[in-house]
Amino acid sequence: MRCTSYSLLLMLVIVLGTTVVSGQAPAKPATTGESTKAEDFTTAIKKLRDTWVQEFNAGHADKVAALYAQEAVLMRGNGSVHNRDSILAELQRSITAEAHNYAVHSLHAEHSGDLGYDTGIYNEKFPNHLAEGNYLVVVKRIKGEWKIVAHAAVPNPRQK
C-alpha cells in the first residue's frame, strides 16, 4: 500500500511539474509587442490618411465618407456635422465647390489600445483662394478596422 501511495504521489508531482514547465513560454522583450503594435498603427493611420486625400482629390466623397464611423463627427470652420450620411453630404459640398489638390502633412500620430489620433497641417485649393490650417483626426478600431470617429479641420485666418 505504501508503494502504491508513493507511486501515485510521484506521478502527481511529475504531471504538475510538466504542466507548469510546458505552460511557461520563453520570455520575450517587453518592447517587441508594443513596437509591433505601434508600427501596425503607424502603417494603418498612414494608409487611412493617404486614402482620404487620394479619394477626396479624385472627387469620391462616398469613398472618403466610408472611412468614418457611422456616428462620427466632422468639425470645420463653417460648423459641425454628425453621422456618416451628413459627413458624406458635407464632403460632396466641398468637392462641388471645386476644392482640389488637398494635401496633408502629419506632424504626430499615436495610439493607445483601440483609440488613436493623427494631427498635422493641411492645404486645400479653391478657385479663388488657398485654405490652410491644422487638423486632428481621432480614430477608433472598430471590428478590427481603424475608423475616423472625430475629425477637426481648423483653418488659418485668411491673408488679405
Image (cartoon, rainbow, N blue to C red):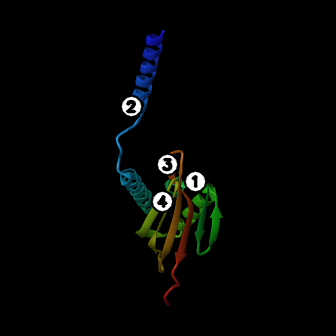
Marks 1 and 2 sit apart, C-alpha to C-alpha, by 43 Å
Of badges 3 and 1, nearer the viewer stands: 3
Work out whether residue 148 or residue 90 is closer to the camera in this orientation and state it: 148
Tell me: 87 left or right of 95: right
Q: Which residue is mark 4?
A: 111
Residue sticking out furthest to the front? 2
- Measure the C-alpha gap from mark 4 to mark 1: 17 Å
Furthest residue in direction top, as rendered: 1
- Residue 7 at x, y = what percent? 43, 15
Q: State which tag comes first along the sequence, 2 or 4.
A: 2
Left or right of residue 124: residue 26: left
Disc 3 or 1, which lies upstream in sequence?
A: 1
SS label for mark 1 = strand
As measured in the structure, the alpha-carbon distance from the residue carrying label 4 to the one carrying label 3 is 14 Å
Mark 2 highlights which residue? 22
Which residue does the numbered mark 1 point to in the structure image? 69
SS category of the residue bearing label 4: strand
